[in-house]
Amino acid sequence: MAKQGYHHGNLRQALIEAALRLIEQQGPQGFTLSDAAKSAGVTPAAVYRHFAGRDDLIAECARQGFAIFGDLMEHAYNDGKPTALRAFEATGRAYLAFARKFPGHYMAMFESGISLTSDPTLARAAERARGVLLRAAEELTRQLPPNRRPPAAMFAAHIWALSHGVVELFARGSPGTRSPFSPEDLLEAGIGIYLRGLGLVPADG
Amino acid sequence: MAKQGYHHGNLRQALIEAALRLIEQQGPQGFTLSDAAKSAGVTPAAVYRHFAGRDDLIAECARQGFAIFGDLMEHAYNDGKPTALRAFEATGRAYLAFARKFPGHYMAMFESGISLTSDPTLARAAERARGVLLRAAEELTRQLPPNRRPPAAMFAAHIWALSHGVVELFARGSPGTRSPFSPEDLLEAGIGIYLRGLGLVPADG
DNA sequence: TGTACATCAGTGAACGCGCGTTCACTGATGTAC
DNA sequence: TGTACATCAGTGAACGCGCGTTCACTGATGTAC
């Protein structure tokens, strides 16, 4: 943003933001380093002052995405307050809100094909985000009697998968169909039914 | 397969199969027309005898995928026999089985970014596959009293999203984590909990 | 405050590459007589 | 059965393009004296 200071001021972040905009518009594979440079008003070669190359630029987008994602999830979870249930539901909503608000980040994280294992900082950022959901699931399953308590990891995986599926199929213009329901309603209802199935929510209409 | 007959015999289908293999290995964006041609033992220019271009080749992969997908789903649904519930569960399993067995098709269908609306035959093929799941959902919700009967379209969307999420996050080597559960177990358990939440399955352990 | 120098962010030209696509062609296959 | 011809699937060379990346450079900024 700040166009002062050195030649450009903050080219590094400007490139990241340009990349995110392009990824959002054209998909992670459609975006090119040259486009990102041009969009930041700079020569392609200038990118190499700040990133090792194209892949590194995408990885940084994903890294920042996971950081924001983790923050949002943690904030929504709010240490399990006011109740474990409410906190959990808020966390689910935060997932979709993130995907909606930061589509470029989301695509860089989940659709760019970058390998989490090859970059430790990226792996750690992803791990933290996953940890929040897992903790929320653990806390919530404590309310169930042990004999009908699902593994928290499975619980969390279900919610993650449902959320991701809703994002991919119904929160984008792309491959699945338009549905008569908003992604938010769809996810909220889906999680509600699922929680009822676990016995975590009363079975009234 | 049949290398007899004309020069090649059945180059069209050979190209499709080469494309599917490449898409499976490198993703829908990573595959190139030239690779597909080479893999089929043919010059890139030969592709244009059978397809309008790269996009048309991908679209045909998706079209065949939707056809197989629809067949599999329909076969699994089996007109709702032996019971609406069993048929529905079989349909859910068929979704994952398809994604497992035909990863190239699956990626061409859901990850290639092709537009369903631009190609009527493609749209029709996709519509049919979706119709099977919707019918299964409708049939099953009839067992519920009207006042606690969710819209079948929403029901179907939930199952589709959960299935798709499981495929994308846990049935591939890629972005999410490895989970201690197999995708099959994950999906089966998830659908089970969901159905219990709807009151379609008894609440015993 | 002013001058000389060091730093280093960004330039501009160039590279090798592989892509999708075109075009005139060739030669194996199928057909008519 | 044999010959002449028509068809058309696949060839091979070429194209224009845009990509990611490199390199020697330049000139604005920061610093020492």
Image (cartoon, coloured by chain):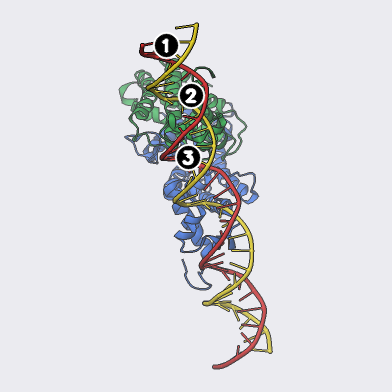
Chain colours: A blue, B green, C red, D yellow
Q: CA distance from mark 2 to mark 3?
A: 53 Å
Q: Nearer the viewer, mark 2 or mark 3?
A: 2
| Chain to which the residue tagged by mark 2 belongs | B
Q: Residues within 10 Å of mark 2 (few under 14, many from 20)?
A: some
* Cα gap from disc 2 to disc 1, whole angstroms: 35 Å
Mark 2 and mark 1 in contact? Answer it, CB < 8 Å.
Answer: no
**Distance between mark 1 and mark 3 Cα atoms:** 38 Å
Q: Which residue is mark 2?
A: B13
Disc 2 with disc 3 on a shared chain? no
Where is residue A134 drawn, in percent x and y? 57, 40
* Chain letter of the residue beneath label 3 in the structure image: A
The amino acid type of the residue labelled 1 equals Lys
User: A105 or A156: nearer the eye?
Assistant: A105
Where is mark 3, residue-wise? A85
Q: Chain ID for label 1?
A: B
Q: Are marks 2 and 1 on the same chain?
A: yes
Give the vertical position of A50 relative to B169 (above or below): below
Q: Amino acid at mark 2?
A: Gln
Q: Which secondary structure lies at badge 2?
A: helix
The answer to whether residue A81 is seen in the rendering is: no
Q: Quadrant of residue A93?
A: top left
Taking the spot 33% from the left edge, 28% from the top edge, the residue there is: B151
B180 displayed left or right of A94: right
Q: Is residue A191 above or below residue A128?
A: above
Q: Residues within 10 Å of mark 3 (few under 14, many from 20)?
A: many
Q: In this picture, is A26 found above or below C12?
A: above
Can you give x and y, in whole percent of width and height, for residue B32 in the image?
51, 38
- Look at the numbered disc 1 and give the secondary structure of its residue: loop
> Can you identify the residue that label 1 sits on?
B81
Camera-side mark, 2 or 1: 2
Dot 3: element: helix
Foreground residue among B46 and A147: B46
